[in-house]
Image (cartoon, grey):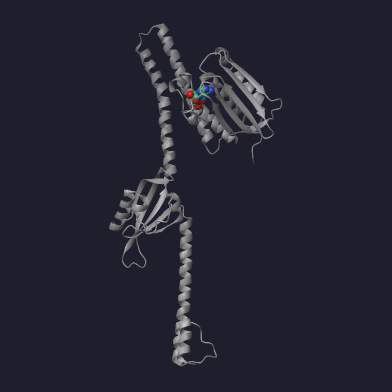
Amino acid sequence: MSLRREVGYLAAEKPLSRGVKGSKVVREIHQDLWTIANRRDAVARKVAEEDFSLRAILSRMAEGVLIADRDLRILLTNRRLHEMFLLPRSPHDRTVMETFRNHELHEVIRHTLESGEPQFAELSIEVKDGEQFQQRHFQISSASVGMPDRGSSRGALVIFHDVTRIRSLEAVRKEFVANVSHELRTPLSIITGYLETLIEGGTDEESSQRFLKTMHKHAHRLNLLIEDLLVLSQLESRTPGLHFEQVDLVQCVDRVVEQLDSRIRTLQATVAVDADKWVPRIEADSVRLEQVVFNLLDNGLKHGGKPGIAIRIRLRASQDCAIIRIQDNGPGIPLSDQPHIFERFYRVHKDRSRDAGGTGLGLSIVKHIVQAHGGTVTLESTPGAGATFVVTLPVQQGE
Ligand code: ADP
């Protein structure tokens, strides 16, 4: 066999076939090279597997991951980071500043690279969503890491944890606590003021009676508020504590109208109930369902704005659902308030609602109860031409 041919076999890293003869030295060299080539292939496979599993881990992480070199140029990112920041194109080879346009983030990473110390920060970063900017909150931890193939050079590994939802829930909770405190404090300070006056003495009988009546009214309001808060907290808990049974809607509405009878008379209001011939029994919590009808009818009377208000309750049914429409001919609800009307403590006229004995929680409770039954509640209102609340409930609860 010619030397040229032997070298050809070596170059192709093919084993010498049995029939092929060669010099002993060439055969040995060939054997060694063959072994080395096999090892190299095994190592390459392993690296590919590891690279693959590393990529798999990175792509499945709930956190965003970024690796930047010492010039803050981005070398690696995972899919989650792209989703978090709605990155329109690959940020590779662009700088942290170019990609995120956030000075604080740039500084955290720069500090990590300079000090070699891990850094933690919570940053609020604007994320561009189409033409809009959203303010999002991230907890960021960054650590210095050695860079493969870059000698002693070090880079930064940065992990992003999106805490926007947690922060917005905290803000809602804080606002709720502030609202509750305010709502509790107002009647309490009125009661305390009148009590102090009475304790000081010197008030005539007529004024004392007036003070006592006002105190009684505000104590009653406090009571209603606490009751509504307890109902709301029960409905918002993991176990809303509903007891489902077969409920006759017509009877349920009649009971509520009866409960409000003396108010209806005092206000010279009319309440007409108009039900389909056939309204099926529905699977519901009867106490809570009465509360829905009560709150909506009570609102019609309370916010109707005039004596002699006319309220119409219509009950319609299909095979799958029952619809309760409660319509009044009061002032209605301004368009700008309509999107917020089911929020806790939202009122169109704060003082007027309080004077009328409202807690600002009635519609929020309605919404929670209806949703817990798998139904919906909507408002239809043309300002100046009354309000109609439409509750749709499934006849049967799902499994
Ligand atoms: P409130 O205890 O004040 O009645 P709700 O949550 O039941 O609280 O209602 C929120 C606000 O919606 C009320 O303060 C009132 O401004 C408005 N509202 C509700 N129902 C009606 C209605 N039928 N007509 C006009 N305004 C209404």
Please tell me how many numbered marks the rendered image carries. 0
Outermost residue toward the left in this view: 114
Q: Does residue 346 appear left or right of residue 148 in this picture?
A: right
Q: Quadrant of the C terminus?
A: top right
**In the foreground, 128 or 62:** 128
Q: Does residue 281 appear left or right of residue 9 in this picture?
A: right
Whole-percent x, y for residue 301 in the image:
54, 19
| Figure check: 369 above or below 91 | above
Residue depicted at x 53% and y 30%: 365
Residue depicted at x 47% and y 81%: 35
Outermost residue toward the front in this view: 131
| Figure check: 43 above or below 353 | below
Q: Does residue 320 appear left or right of residue 329 in this picture?
A: right
Whole-percent x, y for residue 16 in the image:
51, 87
| Figure check: 121 above or below 368 | below
Residue depicted at x 46% and y 72%: 44
Whole-percent x, y for residue 297 in the image:
57, 22
Residue depicted at x 45% and y 80%: 36
- Residue 40 seen in render: yes
Whole-percent x, y for residue 89 in the image:
43, 54
Which quarter of the picture shows residue 349? top left
- Residue 288 seen in render: no
Q: Does residue 288 appear left or right of residue 1 in this picture?
A: right
**In the foreground, 220 or 161:** 161
